[in-house]
Image: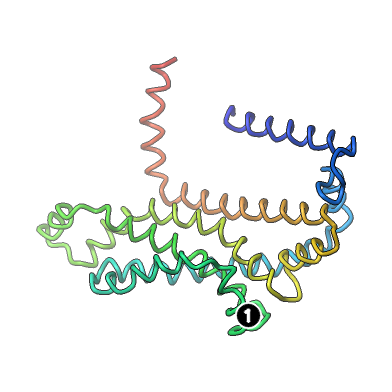
Amino acid sequence: MRKTLLPLGLLIVLLALWQWISSRALIAFWIVPAPLDVVRVFTEQHALIWQHLKPTLLAAISGLLISIVIGSLCAILMDFSKIFKEIVYPYLIVSQTVPIIAIAPILIIWFGYGISSKIFTVILVCFFPITLGLFEGFQQVQIDQIRLMKALGASNYKCFRYLKLPASLPGFFTGLKLAATYSVMGAVIGEWLGGSAGLGIYMTRATKSFQTAHVFAVIGVIIALSMALFGIVAILDRVFLSWRYQHHDEYIEPKRQAKA
């Protein structure tokens, strides 16, 4: 409860201070709008926001799901083939050194202004943390554990299914949580460079019109959407790794009781 109340209390204090500064006209409204003006955008323009939210959400989820498939296949191949890892791994690192905003115009040329370019942008953003998280999870398995299973007659498939795959899930979900938060950002970046709808388009138009309250409203929607996707992944993490959290809780609770 304390972990929730403290951040919430700080947020309330900051919003109150923000509203007070805005009400005193210490900062121009077109530079920093009042929180109530931002709330008014949601009440008056909710239909327009929803219209732009749908394509962004579609691009983010589609790109994230495709990234899960491609990233998982790449991580599995790198684990099974050392040669494949030596070939692909450097390019994975290089792919993260190039700013997405720099290659986004090329994606527009290749895929046009439709949703395909936005999905591909999301894939570029989400692919790396998923692949690296899953691959690092595979590497957590000790060679002695594999030798023991093979000594008991387990095939390579059974070693992967019953040993490596469960061991890799914590790393996979860690990477997936990062990718889930990045997915909305990737979709918005793709929309900045062109299109007919999306939160990125809405934000660009509002910025050019000096409608700062609309920009802040879109930022709030992006944060809420990213947190929602993160929360969904966190729930799946709890479901599939319930044994891990149960063991953690059983370990932490006696320590808390001892301190009390």
Q: Quadrant of the C terminus?
A: top left
Q: Residue at x 34, y 68 (%)?
A: 90
* Residue type, mark 1 in image: Ile
Q: Residue at x 27, y 52 (%)?
A: 140
Q: Residue at x 62, y 54 (%)?
A: 226
**Residue 202 locus on image (x, y percent):** 77, 65
Q: Is residue 131 above or below residue 239?
A: below
**Residue 61 locus on image (x, y percent):** 59, 66
Count all numbered tags in the image, as a single digit. Answer: 1
Mark 1 residue element: helix
Residue in the foreground of this view, choosing between 223 and 58:
223
Residue 203, quarter of the rendered image: bottom right
**Residue 210 locus on image (x, y percent):** 85, 58
Asked whether, in this view, residue 113 is left or right of residue 21, the answer is: left
Colour option used: rainbow
Residue at the far top: name it: 260
Q: Is residue 160 above or below residue 66?
A: above
Q: Residues within 10 Å of mark 1 (few under 14, many from 20)?
A: many
Residue in the foreground of this view, choosing between 2 and 23:
23
> Where is mark 1, residue-wise?
108
**Residue 122 locus on image (x, y percent):** 56, 68
Q: Residue at x 81, y 56 (%)?
A: 214
Asked whether, in this view, residue 74 is left or right of residue 187, the answer is: left
Q: Quadrant of the N terminus?
A: top right
Residue 35, quarter of the rendered image: top right
